[in-house]
Image (cartoon, rainbow, N blue to C red):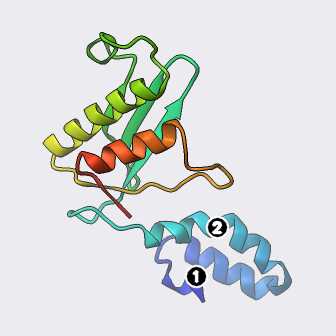
Amino acid sequence: DGDLTCNNQHKSFIHTFREKFPAKMSYVWKAWRPCFETLRRIPHKDGRINSLQYQFSNKYVHAHLVRINDGQILVSASTVEPELRQDLESLSDKKATKVVAEALAERALAKGIDHANFTKPKGKPFHGKMKVLVDTLREKGLRYN
């Protein structure tokens, strides 16, 4: 049973729901699956899980390292920042993504963060700006799960 390893507040809900409605358990499992996927993520040195979050808009590139446990943004970089946008022709292409990734990796390593969790969005190919971001962070020294 995958839910027996889950040691958070959802465990009791799932067990009581399973007892009352055993036929509908597959729907609950799909709804609560993210809870179980977080258990497989590798924690940072202090036992907390850091997640790489990013956004590519038509104007800017944003990237953050977020602590999943409490939602705190540990490190961020964006092409909105004046020091990152100085030498860029476009603020949303692959070159801008590489600059943002380099700045994010530099700031993370300066804070002692050397590990991040990255999960590819389901159904999306791993190429383009996302690949540039992840590969640049990996080259600069961040480890992934």
Q: For the residues marked 2 and 1, what is the alpha-carbon distance in whole angstroms?
A: 9 Å
Task: Identify the element where label 2 is drawn.
Answer: helix
Examine the image and state in which quarter residue 111 appears.
top left
Amino acid, disc 1: Asp
Q: Residue at x 40, y 24 (%)?
A: 96
Instruction: Give the percent coordinates (x, y) of residue 93.
Output: 49, 24
Report the residue that reaches farthest toward the right.
23
Label total for image: 2
Which is nearer the eye, 48 or 114?
Answer: 114
Label number found at residue 3: 1
Instruction: Give the percent coordinates (x, y) of residue 4.
Output: 54, 86
Compared to 74, does 21 lie above or below?
A: below
Amino acid, disc 2: Trp
Kindly check if marks 2 and 1 are in contact, taking CB atoms under 8 A apart as contact.
yes
Q: Residue at x 38, y 38 (%)?
A: 64
81 sits to left or right of 62: left
Query: What residue did someone put label 2 on?
Result: 32
Q: Residue at x 60, y 89 (%)?
A: 1
Examine the image and state in which quarter residue 99 appears.
top left
101 sits to left or right of 125: left
Neighbour tally class for label 1: few under 14, some 14-19, many 20 plus, Cα within 10 Å: some
- Screen quadrant of the C terminus: bottom left
Neighbour tally class for label 2: few under 14, some 14-19, many 20 plus, Cα within 10 Å: some
Compared to 89, does 12 lie above or below?
A: below
Q: Residue at x 33, y 33 (%)?
A: 76
Which is nearer the eye, 83 or 69?
Answer: 83
Instruction: Give the percent coordinates (x, y) of residue 21.
Output: 82, 82
Task: Identify the element where label 1 is drawn.
Answer: helix
Compared to 90, does 19 lie above or below?
A: below
